[in-house]
Image (cartoon, rainbow, N blue to C red):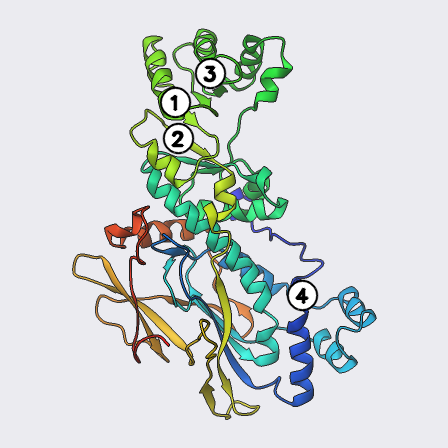
Amino acid sequence: MVPAARLRVPDVDLGDGTALLTDQYELTMLQAALRGGTADRHAVFEVFARSLPAGRRYGVVAGTGRLLDAIEAFRFQPAQLEFLAANGIVDEPTLQWLEKYRFTGNVYGYAEGDCFFPDSPILVVEGTFGEAVLLETLALSILNHDCAIASAASRMVQAAGDRPLIEMGSRRTHEYAAVAAARAAYIAGFATTSNLEAGRRHGVPTAGTSAHSFTLLHDSERHAFEAQLASFGADTTLLVDTYDVERAVRTGVELAGPDLGGVRLDSGDLGALAARVREQLDALGAHGTRIVVTGDLDEYGIAALAAAPVDGYGVGTSLVTGSGAPTASLVYKLVARADGPGEDAAVRPVAKRSPGKPSRGGRKTAVRRIDGHGVAHAEAVFLGEADPGPRDRLLHVPLVRGGEVVGREPLTASRERHARAVAELPPSAVRLSRGEPAVPTEFADGPRP
């Protein structure tokens, strides 16, 4: 049997492909480009965020592994082509082109788990315009969601310090978004998830015990605790705030003994309640019994409990909604294109100049400037190839080469990378107060437009 950590089960049914997880205008642009003779021009697209959500000091790259699966599955099946034809979405020549579609270009990006800042070129897609433009919506829908979740999760992990976090937001979002959210939270440092599908698909460790309904099912709280302890042993965690917390704690220790694994608090003034419960547990000799708190927590609520005798947190709604920033505000922009078809055609930078939404033309690479103390102090973005210094860290890695996925890695590698990336940021990065990005973005050719 394959260990869970090695399983790779995509978030979509690959039998159906991923080609229609897109916006119609991607296909209408393709049709017009085919008719105009420009679809085969070499094109370079970049994914970046013009800014971070208010108060955020850094963003987290997540969703890369899911995106690679989705690109690999981006094929137009007969049923999908029939839908496009029946609804008059594209013409017959475009349908014939789509029937043979395979992405044969290159994709480079910041490695999953790394941090990003405003204007960081976190993904670069190179290919013909026709091939690359079709990936826009797919890339943004995956990356905007997963980066937003991972960015919020990372703040929560930093606020929690060495106390573990449980992701438990499945009931507060779309059923498949819940799986992706659990994966992103794990990359950012969450210890476990309540979502079993995230465990099966991505190898994220799972955890869970009981809800209030389990206690209410039984004739008494004592009977409920007896049943749970008989099934899972003394190391289980009992939910103790269905009725009277003090009585529940006393009953739990009486039944399980001083080796009771943990108690969970889900309501009330969690800080004050945790203090009283810790005092009671110690008085009963249950010095090792853990206290886990849940109940509409976010990074601010977690930080407020730093001095409380809490051993772990469960986070749901705030996590799966990005803690107020449900999207990373990433965009997918054409930054370079050839003058004509063929490999010999000159490639020139192109840029959008719309007020408030400018882009910077040209294919770019980036490095993170690291000082002599191992602390990042700038994000340097270069047109063309980077010019790294002796301590600079190159940020782009190959993800797809010639249409073949080359950038897959275990989820644990992304998780470990994130821990390293946050550790090299300046101390201001983990502040929850409003402020500028922890690392400024510098362009080698001058200030941003």
Q: What residue is disc 2 on?
A: 312
Q: What residue is disc 1 on?
A: 290
Q: Distance from label 2 to label 1 (Cα)?
A: 8 Å
At numbered mark 3, what does the secondary structure look like: helix, strand or loop? Answer: loop
Q: What residue is disc 4 on?
A: 19
Where residue 149 sits: x, y (%)? 48, 49
Tell me what residue is drawn at x 40 percent, y 44 percent.
Answer: 189
Classify the position of the N terminus by image quarter: top right
Where 87 sits versus 300, above or below?
below
Tell me what residue is drawn at x 57 percent, y 44 percent.
Answer: 178
Mark 4 closeness class: few <14, some 14–19, many ≥20 residues within 10 Å: many
Q: Which of marks 2 and 3 is in front?
A: 2
Mark 1 closeness class: few <14, some 14–19, many ≥20 residues within 10 Å: many
Q: Can residue 412 be seen in this view?
A: no
At numbered mark 4, what does the secondary structure look like: helix, strand or loop? Answer: loop
Where residue 52 sits: x, y (%)? 40, 59
**Relative to 85, is 32 on the left or the right?**
left
Q: Distance from label 1 to label 4 (Cα)?
A: 48 Å
Mark 3 closeness class: few <14, some 14–19, many ≥20 residues within 10 Å: many
Identity, as a three-letter code, of the amino acid under mark 3: Ala
Sequence order check, earlier mark of 4 and 3:
4
Where residue 135 sits: x, y (%)? 59, 69
Tell me what residue is drawn at x 59 percent, y 37 percent.
Answer: 171
Sequence order check, earlier mark of 4 and 2:
4
